Image (cartoon, rainbow, N blue to C red):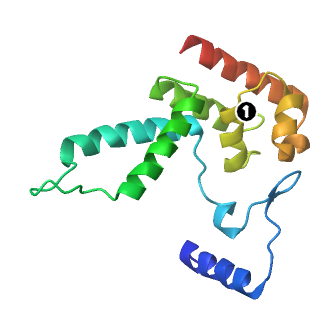
Amino acid sequence: MSTFDNSRATMRKLRLGVKEDLEAGEVLRLGDDLQTASCLTVSEVHHFLKERKAALHNQHPRTDAFGRPTVNPQLAANVAKFEQYCEKFNQFNSSSTVVELRKRIEEHPELGDKLWEFEIAQIANFLVDSPEELKSLVPSLNRIDDAPLQELLDTLRNVQAFH
């Protein structure tokens, strides 16, 4: 079933008053659309938008031959708000650091294959000091022992410090 089909099914359920139990709690129930979706961190989105904006700025003028804007003003305002949010919560100036961080999480010997995409993104977004704090923010991680989580958090802090 495609994402489009899942979205139509979700919309149909909403019209009929059927409520899905979507939750990022002890057990991840994110819905069919997000079960296999890739999740980006705030820093990944920040660097993507920054690179994309630079590329688009060089390729397309902001006005047409008659001086009319070529971008929908409402869309531009929404994108600007999104950029501000990402700028505020971005933790890394270098896109190579962002790539290294994800790589360290995904390739962690004890955790790499046990984490959902959502959890990987949240670990990188929060980048806290202790497993207890991380588990309070991402309850689905309660299924994982503290020792490997602490090891991962220490590794990520080292990446942050040296990049």
Task: Left or right? Give the position of 98 relative to 20.
Answer: left
Task: Left or right? Give the position of 161 relative to 140.
Answer: left
Residue 112 in picture, x, y percent from top left? 71, 39
Q: Is residue 126 above or below residue 120?
A: above
Outermost residue, top side: 162
| Residue at figure coordinates x 82%, y 24% from the top left | 150
| Residue at figure coordinates x 60%, y 34% from the top left | 102
Toward the viewer: 142 or 89? 89
Q: Which residue is mark 1?
A: 109
Q: Is residue 25 above or below residue 151?
A: below
Q: Is residue 53 above or below residue 92?
A: below
| Residue at figure coordinates x 89%, y 51% from the top left | 26
| Residue at figure coordinates x 65%, y 41% from the top left | 121
Outermost residue, bottom side: 16
Residue 43 shows in the view: yes
Q: Dot 1 lies on which element?
A: loop
Residue 69 in picture, x, y percent from top left? 23, 55
Quadrant of residue 130 within the rendered picture? top right
Task: Left or right? Give the position of 124 relative to 3.
Answer: right
Q: Quadrant of the N terminus?
A: bottom right
Quadrant of residue 70 within the rendered picture? bottom left
The kind of residue on which mark 1 rests is Pro
Residue 85 in picture, x, y percent from top left? 55, 38
